[in-house]
Amino acid sequence: MALIANLIENNLDLARCSVNAVSLRYFTSPHAPPTLTGNQQLRAAYVAFNARDIDAALALMTADVAWPKAFKGGFVRGHEEVRAYWTEQWSEIDPHVEPVDFYPEDDGRIWVEVHQVVRDLAGAVLADESVGHCFSFSNGLIEAMEVGPLPPSGRAIITD
């Protein structure tokens, strides 16, 4: 069990470093997109989301990113709307999302199997389930995310 905990912590440390490196590069040179692979970029985005580091997460997204309001329904577009949505969401619930597997699509999108645990602000579990997130990219940045069914089993998994 300690080995598993160490592996998880090492992966989180790597993802945190990726988020910090991307944020530093983005904010010092906003015209230079991150140089992470899609898998690494998505891991960094999930770490930033779980750490409630909105700026680091937004640094991985296009300025006009389309993001689902899974908690409320509908979509938001752009950094400021995503920021406002997440701020509102986190004032009402405490979601935690961990990527499990990554599945590439022929069109460049990446499906992610995610383990999602949602708690109320007192810590009671409201949901503990696996969900699918589908990401599309533009110029090396996340352009859109959709929530959908889990990818079919037996598909290729990105392992980088």
Image: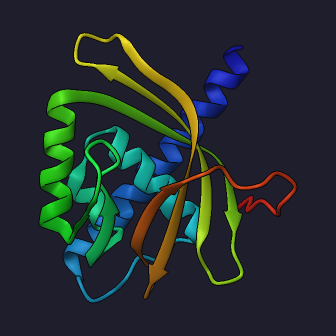
101 left or right of 12 in image: right
Q: Residue furthest front?
A: 73
Q: Can the viewer see residue 25?
A: no
Q: Position of residue 159 (x, y in %)?
A: 74, 58
The structure's colour scheme is rainbow
32 left or right of 89 in image: right
58 left or right of 39 in image: left
Residue drawn 15% across the image and 62% down it? 81
Q: On the image, which quarter does residue 80 sit in? A: bottom left
Residue drawn 41% across the image and 55% down it? 45
Q: Position of residue 58 (x, y in %)?
A: 27, 63
**41 shown above or below 31:** above
Q: Position of residue 141 (x, y in %)?
A: 41, 77
**95 shown above or below 74:** above
Q: Position of residue 69 (x, y in %)?
A: 29, 52
Residue drawn 19% across the image and 67% down it? 79
Q: Is residue 142 or residue 134 the one in the foreground?
A: 134
Q: On the image, which quarter does residue 76 sit in? A: bottom left
Residue drawn 70% across the image and 62% down it? 103
Q: Is residue 145 or residue 19 the one in the foreground?
A: 145
In this rendering, the count of numbered labels is 0
Q: Is residue 1 or residue 136 the one in the foreground?
A: 136
